[in-house]
Image: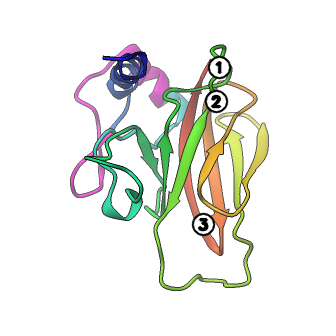
Amino acid sequence: MGSWGRSLLAASVVLLAGCTTTASGGSAAPSATTTTAGAASAATGCHSPVEMESLPDWADAGFHGTSRGPHVFGAKGDIVAVLFAHPLRQVREDGSTNKILWVARASTTSPDPTAPSTLVITATLDGTATRVTREVAGGPGPSGIDMPQAGCWHLDLRWSGHTDTMDLVYAP
């Protein structure tokens, strides 16, 4: 197993131990394992679990095989953040980036065809007034999204007249 596989496996085990899982019906169910990481996660109010199952059909274009990997769904299910850098980090000393592929559910018509396609992310650090804005030109797609502090970030996502929300955790 290469370093990418070992890193992904180790990070997945750590994060999954403290996250909730999504049942096949799409509702969140508490994890059967309670750990210190789980207690810290619950205290921060982060409610978007990192999924390791296959991406849904609408989000797996361009992927090969089972398209498994860490990803987080928006609360409405209209967008998914595929985490190529997992876990996300406030500081990445190895020179890598917090690469996230944003995939929006295709819709037949935009709610507002005049709305800009740029994905605008307004992120608020849980429990603080710290707020930052990030943009992904051209709408959902590949990005490198960094945050100024570690912690749970609540994201308000807007693109092409659509909106959704999710939480992402950035480790120190």
User: As drawn, is 2 to the left or to the right of 66?
Assistant: right
User: As drawn, is 164 to the left or to the right of 130?
Assistant: left
**Which residue is rendered at x = 37% and y = 32% of the image?**
19
Q: Is residue 69 magenta?
A: no
Q: Which residues are magenta?
A: 21-42
Q: Is the C-beta separation of discs 1 and 2 under 8 Å? A: yes
Q: What type is the residue that disc 1 sits on? A: Arg
State how far apart marks 1 and 2 are (Cα).
7 Å
From the viewer's perspective, is the residue at label 3 or at label 2 nearer? 2
Q: Coloring scheme of the render?
A: rainbow
Instruction: Tell which circle, 3 or 1, labels the residue nearer the N-terminal end.
Output: 1
Q: Nearer the viewer, residue 132 or 46?
A: 132
Q: Which mark is residue 163?
A: 3
Disc 2 is placed on an element classified as loop
- Measured as percent of width and height from the top left, residue 59 is found at 40, 59
Q: Which mark is residue 92?
A: 1
Q: Is residue 41 magenta?
A: yes
User: As drawn, is 169 to the left or to the right of 16?
Assistant: right
What is the quadrant of the N terminus in the image?
top left
Q: What type is the residue that disc 3 sits on? A: Thr
Instruction: Tell which circle, 3 or 2, labels the residue nearer the N-terminal end.
Output: 2
How many C-alpha atoms fall within 10 Å of the one at disc 3: few (<14), some, or many (≥20)?
some
**Which residue is rendered at x = 30% and y = 21% of the image?**
34
Q: What type is the residue that disc 2 sits on? A: Thr
How many C-alpha atoms fall within 10 Å of the one at disc 1: few (<14), some, or many (≥20)?
some
